[in-house]
Amino acid sequence: MPKGLGGLELRRGGRCLDVACGLGEQSLWAAQQGFEVVALDASEVAITALNSAAMNLGIRDQIDTRVHDLDDGLPAELAGTCALVVCQRFRDVALYEQLVYMLQPEGVLVITVLSQVGVAGDPGAFHAPPGELIDAFRELDLDIVRSLEADGEATLVARRR
Ligand SMILES: C[S@@+](CC[C@H](N)C(=O)[O-])C[C@H]1O[C@@H](n2cnc3c(N)ncnc32)[C@H](O)[C@@H]1O
């Protein structure tokens, strides 16, 4: 389950977009919850591993895996079609607005990035400064459901209006 979703009432079914899916932990979870998943990652190794895991679990036909470079943005044809957008442990500020526009009305976004909050010493360039997620997303067409920042991670859960 994506971080931050625990206990949240979530309508099951529809499309889930897993952005930078890696080995696909969230994709596999979403498919098992009844979502039709589109899983994107630039790594062919990660996508191959996700295909194998999905095959072993008997849910391969519920996950559309795509080798996709997010530097090219999100797939435009998915705009407005997703009941759930998950982006866990991948941070690209340039994609924040696009993540929202992938959602259908009342669709839920769950994003987790590395954060400077709760990191001792120099956290390095990949960690978001305090408040980055809430500052970026509160201006968009969303209701913020949850915002957590601690222990080197920031998570935001929001629902599209
Ligand atoms: C830390 S992993 C997170 C994986 C997964 N979301 C999770 O939480 O387990 C970051 C992922 O981002 C992917 N990634 C990095 N840069 C990317 C890019 N430009 N386009 C697509 N995927 C990218 C990597 O291949 C890697 O699988």
Image (cartoon, rainbow, N blue to C red):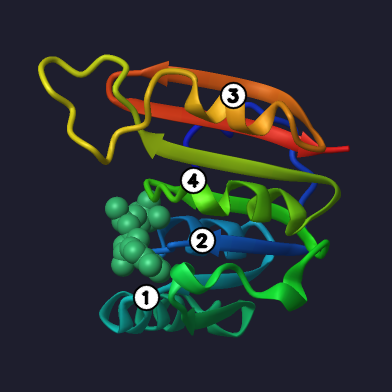
Which disc, if any, is residue 139? none
Which residue is tagged 3?
134
State the image coordinates of residue 95 (x, y, percent, origin top left). 56, 54
Location of residue 77 by image quarter: bottom right
Q: What is the secondary structure assignment of the residue under circle 1?
A: loop
Q: Earlier in the sequence, mark 4 or mark 2?
A: 2
State the image coordinates of residue 59 (x, y, percent, origin top left). 55, 77
Q: CA distance from mark 3 to mark 2?
A: 19 Å
Residue 73 vertical position relative to residue 30 in the rendered view, above or below:
below
Which residue is tagged 4?
93
Between marks 3 and 2 in the image, the one whose residue lies nearer the viewer: 3
Between marks 3 and 4 in the image, the one whose residue lies nearer the viewer: 4
Please tell me how crowded label 1 is: few (under 14), some (14-19), or many (20+) other residues with Cα within 10 Å: some
Which residue is tagged 1?
42
State the image coordinates of residue 61 (x, y, percent, origin top left). 61, 85
Q: CA distance from mark 4 to mark 1?
A: 17 Å
Residue 131 vertical position relative to residue 82 in the rendered view, above or below:
above
Location of residue 81 by image quarter: bottom right
Q: What is the secondary structure assignment of the residue under circle 3?
A: helix
Q: Is residue 23 visible?
A: no
In the image, the residue with mark 2 has its CB under 8 Å from the nearest atom of ligand 1: yes
Q: Earlier in the sequence, mark 3 or mark 4?
A: 4
